Image: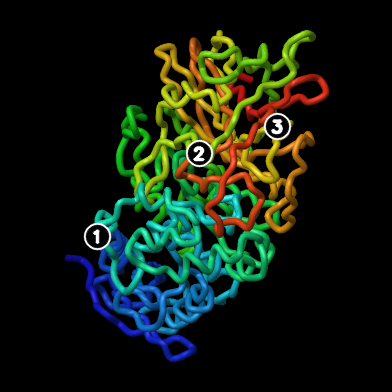
C-alpha cells in the first residue's frame, strides 16, 4: 500500500456546520497539491475510493467530502443552494493544511460537476483547476418546459434524507403518469417539498438565477477539463460550458467527448452498438495529466495538444480539434417536404438540401393527445435517460411526422450542435414541438442520435412566457443538442417531428393553464409548414475531413 487514509475528518464551514471528509494521502509526508471531490452520493462509494487510491499514489491528497446534509455531514441538504459558498470554505480549509502546498483542484461528475462551477463563481483563491464531468446545465436548458422533467422526482427520492434510498421500491411509470404534476410525489409515498417548490417557479426568475452559472462565465477564470459523452442525458451542458468559457476569453479550456452515456467510459457497448476497444480510455490517467500540468507545473501533453478530443461515432475514431464547433464546419440546411402525408414512417415525408419543389404539399398535420403521448424509449429510473435506441416502432404512429433523406451515396459526418427551425401552428393556447435526429440503417433500424423540444409559451425564452394564438404561424427554434456521427453510405438521415417525448419531458396538456397545477387536458391539432414561404428545416454541422 503506497497511500494512507484518514476517515471522517471534520471541515468547519463559516456558519459552524461541520462536513465529513475522507482523506487519501501519499505514503511519504510532505506538501502536495490537493483534489477536492464533494458528493451527495456518499464519499465512501467505490468510485471515490478508487480515485482516492489512484491520485494519492501519484502524489496528490484527495479529499472526498459529503456535501451539507448528506452522509456523515451536518446541516440540511437543499440541492445546489449552499454548494458554492460551502465549496469556497472547503477549498480554502484544504489549502491551509500542512499536507497541502496551496494548490487545489476539484473533480467530479453530474451534481459534482455543477457545484464546481457554483464554487468557482465564489472565486476561492486556491482553486487552480477543475474537472467537471457530465455537468448539468442551468435550469430550463435541459428541460425547456418550465417544469423539471418527470424523472427528476426519481433523483429527489434517491437523495432524500442522509443516505441513498432504494429507488427500486417505487413504480416509477405510475408516478410519471400522475396528474396534477405538482402532486406527483404522492405516488412515491413521500411528500417532497423540493419538488413542489421547483414547480412553483416555472419561469427563469430569481429563484433559479441564484443557482445558475452559464450566464456568468466572465466571472470564472480557472483551467477546466470539460468531459461528457454524446449519449449523456445531460450532454448539452458540457460543450456549452467549454464554448462559453472560450468565448468569455478564458484560456486553458479543454473538452473531451466520448461515445458514452451519463456513466462515462464503462463499456465499449451502448445498446446494440459496439464502438470498439479504442472507445474506452484510461480516464484517471487522462485527468492526472491535466492536473499534473495545472497543479504541479509538469510538462504533459496538455502543454501543446489541441484542446478538443472527440470520438466520432460510426467511424469509431478519436480526433483532436482546435475548437468547438469544429473549424471548417459546413452548416447545411436540410429541408422538410412531403406530399401532405408525412405521418409515420409509412408516409411520404422527405428531407433534402433543396427547398420543397413547386407544386408539392405545403404542410403536414397531426393530432397530439396528452393522454396518449409519443413514448421516449428509456428505463424508468433517472440513472440514464435514453440512448441509441431504435425508434422504428414509435414511427408507426400518425402523430409522428417522419422526414427521410435519399439513400446516401457516400459517408456524411455530422459533428457539432444541431438545431431545427420549424414553422408551425396549433389550435391550442400552448403546446410542444419535438425534433429528433436519427440514422436509418439499411435494415430499417432508426437509431436516435439526439433530440430537443420547444414549449410554445417559451418560444421567446423561459423568462418571457407568452401563450400562442390559435391558427397563427410561428417560427420556432428547437435546440437538438450535439452529436458526432458518421452516416454511412447506404444509410439515410431522418428527423421526426412530434409534440411529446414522454417521460423525458412532461406532457403539455395544451390548455395554457398554470404549468403543473391542473389535470384538465385537450387534444391539440398541429400543423407543420414546409414551403418557400415557410421553409422548415434542420441545420446539420457537416464535416469534410478530406479537404
Give the secondary structure at mark 3: strand
Check the image and report above or below for 395 versus 230.
above
Residue farthest left in this picture: 1
Quadrant for the N terminus, please: bottom left
Callout 2: helix, strand or loop? Answer: loop
In the image, is residue 468 above or below residue 276?
A: below
Cα distance in 3D space between marks 3 and 1: 46 Å
* Residue depicted at 26% across the width and 60% down the height: 166
- Measure the alpha-carbon separation of dots 2 and 1: 34 Å
Compare residues 120 and 353 and report the one nearer the observer: 353
Q: Quick one: SS at disc 1?
A: helix
Dot 3 or dot 1: first in sequence order is 1
Label 1: few (<14), some or many (≥20) within 10 Å?
Answer: few
The disc label shown at residue 501, or none: 2
According to the image, label 3 marks what residue? 422
Percent position (x, y) of residue 493?
Answer: 55, 20
- Residue 324 seen by the camera: no
Badge 2 or badge 1: first in the primary sequence: 1
How many numbered marks appear?
A: 3
Q: Describe residue 94's horizontal placement relative to residue 55 as left or right.
A: right
Q: Quadrant of the C terminus?
A: top right
Q: At which x and y percent is residue 268?
A: 32, 35
Question: Looking at the image, what colour scheme do you see?
Answer: rainbow
Camera-side mark, 2 or 1:
2
Res 369 quadrant in image: top right
| Residue assigned mark 1 | 46
Residue 251 visible in rendering: yes
* Residue 440 horizontal side relative to residue 468, left or right: left
Q: Identify which residue is drawn at 55% across, 62% down.
A: 199
Amino acid at each position: 500500500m503506497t497511500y494512507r487514509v484518514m476517515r471522517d475528518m471534520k471541515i468547519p464551514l463559516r456558519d459552524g456546520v461541520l462536513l465529513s471528509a475522507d482523506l487519501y494521502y501519499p505514503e511519504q509526508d510532505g506538501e502536495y497539491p490537493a483534489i477536492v471531490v464533494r458528493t451527495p452520493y456518499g464519499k465512501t462509494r467505490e468510485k471515490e475510493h478508487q480515485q482516492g487510491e489512484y491520485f494519492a499514489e501519484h502524489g496528490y491528497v484527495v479529499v472526498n467530502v459529503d456535501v451539507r446534509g448528506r452522509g456523515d455531514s451536518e446541516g440540511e441538504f437543499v440541492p445546489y443552494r449552499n454548494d458554492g459558498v460551502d465549496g469556497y470554505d472547503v477549498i480554502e480549509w484544504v489549502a491551509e493544511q500542512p499536507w497541502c502546498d496551496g494548490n487545489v483542484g476539484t473533480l467530479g461528475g453530474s451534481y459534482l460537476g455543477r457545484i464546481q462551477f457554483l464554487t468557482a463563481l465564489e472565486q476561492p483563491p486556491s482553486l487552480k483547476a477543475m474537472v467537471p464531468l457530465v455537468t448539468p446545465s442551468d435550469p430550463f436548458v435541459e428541460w425547456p418546459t418550465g417544469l423539471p422533467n418527470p424523472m427528476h422526482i426519481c433523483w429527489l427520492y434517491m437523495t432524500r434524507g442522509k443516505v441513498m434510498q432504494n429507488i427500486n421500491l417505487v413504480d416509477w411509470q405510475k408516478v410519471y403518469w400522475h396528474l396534477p404534476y405538482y402532486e406527483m410525489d404522492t405516488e412515491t409515498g413521500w411528500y417532497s417539498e423540493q419538488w413542489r417548490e421547483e414547480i412553483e417557479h416555472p419561469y427563469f426568475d430569481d429563484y433559479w438565477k441564484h443557482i445558475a452559472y452559464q450566464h456568468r462565465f466572465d466571472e470564472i477564470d480557472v483551467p477546466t477539463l470539460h468531459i461528457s459523452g454524446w449519449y449523456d442525458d445531460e450532454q448539452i451542458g458540457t460543450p456549452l460550458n467549454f464554448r462559453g468559457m472560450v468565448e468569455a476569453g478564458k484560456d486553458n479550456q479543454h473538452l473531451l467527448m466520448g461515445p458514452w452515456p451519463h456513466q462515462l467510459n464503462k463499456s465499449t457497448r451502448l445498446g446494440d452498438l459496439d464502438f470498439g476497444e479504442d472507445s474506452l480510455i484510461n480516464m484517471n490517467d487522462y485527468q492526472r495529466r491535466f492536473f499534473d500540468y495545472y497543479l504541479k507545473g509538469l510538462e504533459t501533453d496538455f502543454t501543446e495538444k489541441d484542446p478538443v478530443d472527440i470520438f466520432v461515432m460510426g467511424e469509431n475514431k478519436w480526433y483532436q480539434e482546435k475548437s468547438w464547433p469544429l473549424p471548417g464546419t459546413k452548416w447545411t440546411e436540410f429541408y422538410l417536404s412531403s406530399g401532405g402525408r408525412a405521418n409515420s414512417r409509412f408516409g411520404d415525408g422527405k428531407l433534402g438540401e433543396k427547398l420543397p419543389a413547386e407544386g408539392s404539399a405545403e404542410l403536414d398535420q397531426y393530432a397530439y393527445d396528452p393522454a396518449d403521448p409519443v413514448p421516449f424509449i428509456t428505463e424508468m429510473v433517472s440513472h440514464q435517460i435514453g440512448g441509441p435506441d431504435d425508434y422504428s416502432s414509435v414511427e408507426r404512429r400518425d402523430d409522428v411526422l417522419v422526414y427521410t433523406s435519399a439513400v446516401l451515396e457516400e459517408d456524411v459526418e455530422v459533428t457539432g450542435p444541431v438545431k431545427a427551425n420549424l414553422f408551425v401552428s396549433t389550435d391550442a393556447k400552448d403546446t410542444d414541438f419535438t425534433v429528433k435526429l436519427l440514422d436509418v440503417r439499411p435494415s430499417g433500424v432508426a437509431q436516435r442520435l439526439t433530440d430537443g423540444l420547444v414549449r410554445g409559451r417559451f418560444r421567446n425564452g423561459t423568462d418571457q412566457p407568452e401563450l400562442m394564438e390559435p391558427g397563427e404561424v410561428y417560427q420556432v427554434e428547437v435546440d437538438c443538442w450535439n452529436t458526432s456521427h458518421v452516416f454511412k453510405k447506404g444509410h439515410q438521415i431522418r428527423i421526426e417531428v412530434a409534440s411529446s417525448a414522454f417521460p423525458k419531458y412532461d406532457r403539455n396538456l395544451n390548455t395554457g393553464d398554470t404549468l403543473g397545477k391542473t389535470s384538465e387536458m385537450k387534444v391539440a391539432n398541429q400543423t407543420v409548414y414546409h414551403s418557400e414561404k415557410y421553409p422548415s428545416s434542420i441545420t446539420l454541422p457537416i464535416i469534410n475531413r478530406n479537404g
